[in-house]
Amino acid sequence: MAAVAYPNGQEDQRLAGIFARNPIDADYFSEYIIAAALLFTCLVGFAYAIRLLFLRLYSGSALAADLVPVFALLWLPVTFREANLAYLHDFPTLLLFTLSLYLLVAQRWSAFYIVIALGCLNKETFILLTPIFAWYYLRRMPRTRLLQHSAAQLAIFAVIQAPLYWSFQHNAGGQLEVHLLGHNLYVFRHLPYDIISVLVLFVLLGGLFHDWQHKPRLLKCGLGALAIVLPLAMVFAWIDELRAYYEFFPVVMLLLFHTFSKYALAESLHSREPIASKPAAERQERS
């Protein structure tokens, strides 16, 4: 590859070597720098957002709160794959969805709907927040208000996504592509079924569900929504493309950290969430 030329006529061989080793077009170097800065900002924002969410859900120590972002960021590379399966909207999804979960629990509705609008503009799967919201506030919010909030979220999604769909409807590819009998069947046939892989899976599942009764309702609702998404992903997505599940990354991380804190930090976390009984919710509905 030719060296990169500068206005003074000198050539920076070191920069040219970087371009030679990486699939980066030198003509768009400034765009790559802007994108890298955006992604770094979103990662920093995600770290702060998951800490806020932890503090809202748990009454834990300052040490535990400080370790939550580190714990999540250390797990993040597990989701990385080759460069052509990473997208600019991935890290913004992490930030916006985690922040929306915090705002949902905090009931800061003005900021919540701003984040929803940004999230729907960033990625269409942000609508997965709505079933989590509905499940979380079921019997915790008057039915009329619950329906109003749910309808507002669906309306924001439609208003944002409809023009995008109309603008790009003639692009190559379809809205849904069936991958069950192609890629996903191949993945299932070639999964590592050795004892080490089974033990790792067992440990991860144990970390998710251990002490389940003491884990926050929001996280349980989030994992429940993932159970709805997985069958659809099995048919219409690459089942092993972990970055496609970034909406659930903060949920999984906090569920795992709950167990990690108990055994690694010797600290039993307790949920801050109030328990709403059915009669109380019904009285609130009638009022």
Image: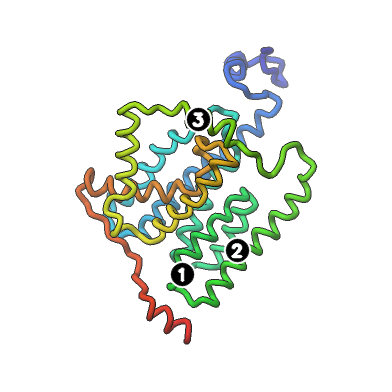
Q: Secondary structure at mark 3?
A: helix
Q: Earlier in the sequence, mark 3 or mark 1?
A: 1
Q: Is residue 274 above or below residue 122?
A: below
Q: Amino acid at mark 3?
A: Val
Q: For mark 2, does the 10 Å Cα neighbourhood hold few (<14), some (14 to 19), or many (20 or more) residues?
A: some
State the residue at coordinates (30%, 39%): 203
Question: 278 and 87: which one is in front?
Answer: 278
Residue 50: x %, y % from top left: 42, 51
Please tell me which residue is depicted at 27% across the width and 60% down the height of the picture.
270
Q: Quadrant of residue 234?
A: top right
Q: How many marks?
A: 3
Report which residue position mark 1 lands on.
138
Foreground pick, 103 / 144: 144
The earlier-in-sequence mark between 3 and 2 is: 2
Does the residue at mark 1 contact the one at mark 2 (Cβ under 8 Å)? no
Question: Label 3 belongs to which residue?
Answer: 187
Residue with the mark numbered 2: 153
Q: Is residue 63 left or right of residue 177?
A: left
Q: Is residue 116 left or right of residue 255?
A: right
Left/right of residue 114 with respect to residue 270 in the rendered view: right
Position of residue 175 relative to residue 277, above or below, is: above
- Residue occupying the point 55% across, 63% down: 111
* Cα–Cα gap, marks 3 and 2: 35 Å
